[in-house]
Amino acid sequence: MIYVKRNGVTVLELLSIVVPDSTRPASETTTASNAVQTNLMGLLRRGSLSFEINYVAFVDLTHQGLLDAMLVQSEDVYEFSDGGDVQTSYGLVESFKFQGLPVDGVVRVRVSVLLIAEPPNLLIQEDSGGLLTEDFVDLELDL
């Protein structure tokens, strides 16, 4: 299933998704005494999650929420899948771009989310009043 969730809420009207690549840049560590080139791998870096939506803010509040998140620099939990593995990460909306004029009633918006960290064991659930709450969960491992 292809989807994007922000803080546990599915972003509706998803048209396409491009999952981020992970990279680990190399730093050369060769010295004059080395017979061959040597390298040390750097920190694991995650790219940006990019997806396109049919913008319907008056119907789907998640669209307005994405725009608001960019304006206030909100650090949120994003869960996403392109039909393969499910990935979860903290992220910041770095761009929210309208893609020209509407065609056949579709207002295309390209959203880019900079993934910044793996979240701790975070459980996002709905309380009795229908509001989302966050709780940290202690996981017990059987060793």
Image: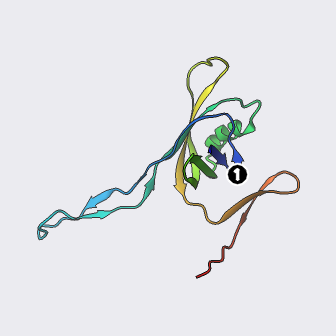
Which scheme is used to colour this image of the protein? rainbow
Instruction: From the viewer's side, name the closer residue of 16 and 129.
Output: 16
Name the image quarter holding the N terminus: top right
Whether 130 is drawn above or below 63: the answer is below
**Image position, residue 44 (x, y; %):** 42, 59
Name the kind of residue labelled 1 in the image. Answer: Gly
Q: Pick out the residue farthest to the bottom.
A: 143
**Image position, residue 49 (x, y; %):** 53, 45
Could you classify mark 1 by the number of other residues whose Cα lies within 10 Å: few (under 14), some (14-19), or many (20 or more)? some
Residue 120 falls in image quadrant:
bottom right
In terms of secondary structure, where does tag 1 sit? loop
Whether 130 is drawn above or below 44: the answer is above
**Residue of label 1:** 8
Residue at image coords 58%, 82%? 143
**Image position, residue 60 (x, y; %):** 74, 35
Residue at image coords 65%, 44%? 69
- 94 displayed left or right of 71: left
Whether 44 is drawn above or below 69: the answer is below
Residue at image coords 67%, 34%? 13
Instruction: From the viewer's side, name the closer residue of 126 and 42.
Output: 126
- 143 displayed left or right of 11: left
**Image position, residue 121 (x, y; %):** 64, 66
Residue at image coords 62%, 51%? 79
- 41 displayed left or right of 119: left
